[in-house]
Image (cartoon, rainbow, N blue to C red):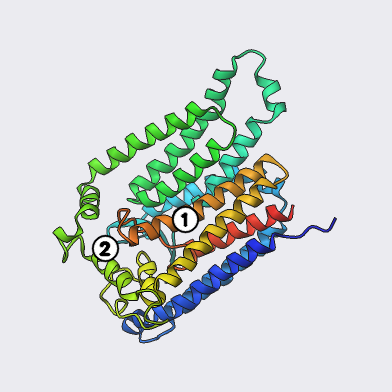
């Protein structure tokens, strides 16, 4: 039979990308004019990232999944080394007190964004190999099953998470760490592993999150600001208050595409963290609901691709990529409307930023490849 990709998933992904670029074109113009006297500066850079992402997507679609699986460890190690390179002088670049970027001429990229893909690929490869019957037959003859699951599944899983956690903690990037951790836990939970493994992982993760929050006072302040933003409306609560003003100003139908007033310097990080607030102001409750429904459709078709995958590795990769993109989207939306602490993570396909857009396009390409197989 002729192999075809999942066209409904492709259609939903294309709509999200198209909608995101149309919206960013109007949103970025004031900031571009103010900083560079060019209304299309940020849009042009985002288009470059789109082109790079599409080229990589075409390459990924042509690479066999078996080859991707075999090279997943290599890709993960290279990504870890690049993520550590941000601490090197000259190469690493610091913004807002955090070192997360590598400079290439006048441009920068964030290696931790690629960890969202390489960590998923490596964990899926590890789990699919160690749950295979051949692997079990070779190693289970002299050990009990529980010990086998502990040493060959749970401990390597914790090791992967620990390496990522240490590096991203040093980068002060707990938001990306949270996204990666949740995606990997979802993969592990859906891999037919013992339930107590997942419960233990959540318990350790919760303890680690509390520890990270307690170490840095500003993280506690974020939680307090979420509960009472009105206590400091011109300081820590300023961004969430302005986000809610933008959302409320949009009403049902919105002010109209490009007619936001909050984007003219009133709302901090309007092109990245708070892009959904501007969307709500310009397109109202109707437009915001449509965007949420598009992400829900992305979730539905992504998991549908996973269910129909021909092998365990492909199935787990589809689950991981879908979970990562949708979970990141809803965390961004939740922080914008004041039901989750401000996280600093971008809204997939909408927020300005080349590295995250490239990784999301590559993720879509992997899902389309799995659906074709």
Q: Position of residue 144 (x, y in %)?
A: 59, 14
- Mark 2 lies on a secondary structure that is helix
- Mark 1 lies on a secondary structure that is helix
Identify the residue under disc 2: 240
Regarding residue 107, the answer to whether it shows in the image is no
How many discs appear? Answer: 2
Say left or right for 343 vs 135. left
Q: Which residue is pictured at 20% across the width and 59% down the height?
A: 229
Marker disc for residue 113: 1
Q: Which residue is pictured at 26% across the width and 43% down the height?
A: 213
Q: Earlier in the sequence, mark 1 or mark 2?
A: 1
Disc 2 packing (10 Å; few <14; some 14–19; many ≥20) = many
Q: Position of residue 285 (x, y in %)?
A: 40, 70
Disc 1 packing (10 Å; few <14; some 14–19; many ≥20) = many
Q: Which residue is pictured at 53% across the width and 45% down the height?
A: 119
Is 270 placed above or below 307 here?
below
Quadrant of residue 364 in the image?
A: bottom right
Say left or right for 223 vs 64. left
Between 244 and 65, which is closer to the camera in this rendering? Answer: 244
């Amino acid at each position: 039979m002729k192999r075809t990709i999942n066209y409904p998933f492709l259609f939903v992904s294309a709509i999200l990308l198209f909608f995101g670029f149309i919206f960013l074109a109007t949103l970025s113009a004031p900031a571009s004019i103010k900083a560079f006297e060019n209304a299309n500066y940020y849009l042009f850079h985002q288009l470059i990232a789109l082109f790079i992402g599409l080229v990589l997507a075409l390459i990924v679609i042509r690479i066999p999944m078996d080859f991707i699986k075999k090279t997943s460890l290599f890709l993960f190690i290279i990504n870890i080394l690049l993520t550590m390179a941000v601490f090197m002088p000259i190469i690493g670049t610091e913004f807002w007190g955090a070192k997360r970027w590598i400079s290439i001429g006048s441009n920068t990229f964030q290696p931790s964004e690629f960890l969202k893909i390489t960590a998923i690929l490596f964990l899926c490869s590890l789990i699919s190999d160690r749950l295979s019957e051949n692997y079990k037959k070779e190693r289970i003859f002299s050990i009990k099953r529980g010990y086998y699951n502990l040493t060959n599944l749970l401990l390597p899983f914790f090791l992967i998470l620990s390496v990522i956690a240490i590096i991203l903690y040093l980068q002060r990037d707990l938001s990306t760490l949270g996204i990666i951790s949740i995606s990997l836990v979802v993969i592990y939970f859906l891999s037919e592993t013992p339930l107590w493994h997942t419960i233990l992982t959540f318990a350790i993760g919760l303890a680690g999150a509390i520890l990270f929050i307690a170490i840095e006072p500003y993280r506690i302040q974020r939680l307090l600001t979420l509960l009472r933003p009105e206590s400091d409306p011109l300081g820590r609560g300023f961004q969430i208050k302005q986000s809610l003003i933008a959302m409320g100003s949009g009403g049902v139908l919105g002010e109209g595409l490009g007619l936001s007033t909050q984007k003219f310097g009133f709302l901090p990080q309007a092109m990245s963290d708070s892009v959904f607030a501007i969307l709500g102001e310009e397109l109202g409750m109707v437009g915001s609901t449509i965007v949420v429904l598009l992400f829900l459709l992305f979730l539905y078709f992504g998991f549908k691709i996973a269910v129909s995958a021909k092998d365990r590795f492909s199935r787990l990769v589809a689950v991981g990529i879908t979970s990562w993109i949708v979970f990141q989207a809803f965390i961004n939306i939740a922080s914008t409307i004041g039901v989750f602490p401000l996280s600093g993570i971008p809204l997939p396909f909408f927020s300005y930023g080349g590295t995250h857009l490239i990784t999301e396009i590559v993720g879509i390409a992997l899902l389309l490849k799995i659906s074709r197989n």
